[in-house]
Amino acid sequence: MTIAEAGEKYSLSTDTLRYYERIGLIPPVNRTKGGKRDYTDTDCRWVEFIKCMRGAGLAVEVMIEYVSLFQKGDSTRNARKAILIDQREKLAQRTAELQETLNRLDVKIARYDTALLEAEKNLFP
């Protein structure tokens, strides 16, 4: 798959895909004999993984570290797992905070019409 096709498939610009590769956010993408990027299934799985992790709010630096460790092989398995566990804990905490905010908004919305009506009555007795 070409870089343009990969970009379209994952809703990322070709510049973003090149950037991700250049900074080590995804491993080097396979190339044709002519040197053009040729995204394999493995390359695409990396793009999907990074897009998912970035969408969840994981820092670029953390993901670069993870990819770098992955490229060093099985000896880094525990370190990679520790990164994932740490990031999961942070994401769970943020999710709980977001849920609390969502609950608060739900209460405010549910009371909104009643509170607004009451406020209007006080303005125009």
Image (cartoon, rainbow, N blue to C red):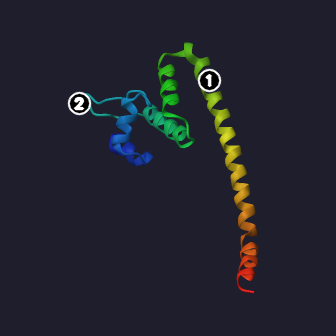
Label 1, residues with CA under 10 Å away: few <14, some 14-19, many ≥20: few
Would residue 58 appear left or right of 85 to someone viewing this image? left
Q: Residue at x 47, y 22 (%)?
A: 68
Q: Residue furthest bottom?
A: 125
Q: CA distance from mark 2 to mark 1?
A: 37 Å
Q: Residue furthest top?
A: 75
Q: Read off the residue under disc 1.
A: 81
Asked if residue 39 shows in the view, the reply is no
Would residue 63 appear left or right of 82 to someone viewing this image? left
Would residue 59 appear left or right of 124 to someone viewing this image? left
- Callouts 2 and 1 close, C-beta under 8 Å: no
Please tell me which residue lies in front, 15 or 95. Answer: 95
Q: Position of residue 33 (x, y in %)?
A: 25, 28
Q: Read off the residue under disc 2.
A: 34
Residue 31 sits in which quadrant? Answer: top left
Please tell me whether residue 85 is drawn above or below residue 7 in the rendered image. above
Q: Position of residue 62 (x, y in %)?
A: 53, 29
Asked if residue 11 shows in the view, the reply is yes
The label number, if any, that marks residue 13 in the structure image: none
Please tell me whether residue 58 is drawn above or below residue 79 in the rendered image. below
Q: Residue at x 69, y 52 (%)?
A: 101
Please tell me whether residue 16 is drawn above or below residue 23 in the rendered image. below
Residue 84 sits in which quadrant? Answer: top right
SS at mark 2 in the image: loop
Q: Position of residue 96 (x, y in %)?
A: 71, 44
Q: Residue at x 59, y 19 (%)?
A: 79
Q: Residue furthest left?
A: 34
Q: Residue at x 56, y 12 (%)?
A: 75
Residue type at numbered disc 1: Lys
Residue type at numbered disc 2: Gly
Q: Nearer the viewer, mark 2 or mark 1?
A: 1
